[in-house]
Amino acid sequence: MRTCPKCKKRISPLYFGTACRSCGADLMYYHFEERLAEDARKAAAQEEKGRRLLNKLPLHRKNSGLKNNNNTDII
Ligand SMILES: [Zn+2]
């Protein structure tokens, strides 16, 4: 559940506006840099996880290569 970073009121997941309906705080840019750093940390962790997974599955790369070859043949 999202909450307003300023007044801590709940924000409906169906509400896609950029400003809190209670206090008018800008939800997009309030603490934006903080969240950006958090996102970067998560993305780095996710990437590391994905790389380990790919290393375990060498067939994945092979299959995507075959797909590309088929596409160029059709064209
Ligand atoms: Zn608010």
Image (cartoon, helix red, strand yellow):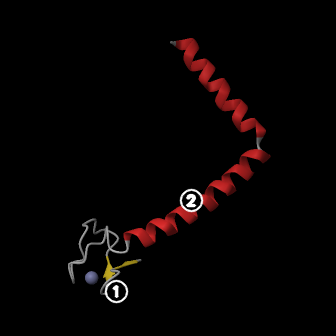
- Give the residue drawn at x 44%, y 70%: 35
Badge count: 2
Query: Does the beta carbon at disc 2 come under 8 Å from ligand 1?
Result: no
Q: Is residue 55 above or below residue 63?
A: below
Mark 1 sits on what residue? 8
| 38 left or right, relative to 23 | right
| 26 left or right, relative to 69 | left
Mark 2 and mark 1 lie on one chain; the one further toward the N terminus is 1
Circle 2 residues within 10 Å: few <14, some 14–19, many ≥20: few
| 50 left or right, relative to 56 | left
Q: Amino acid at mark 2?
A: Ala
Disc marking residue 36: none
Query: Does the beta carbon at disc 1 come under 8 Å from ligand 1?
Result: yes
Camera-nearest residue between 10 and 33 = 33
Quadrant containing ligand 1 reads bottom left
Mark 2 sits on what residue? 43
- Give the residue drawn at x 30%, y 72%: 27
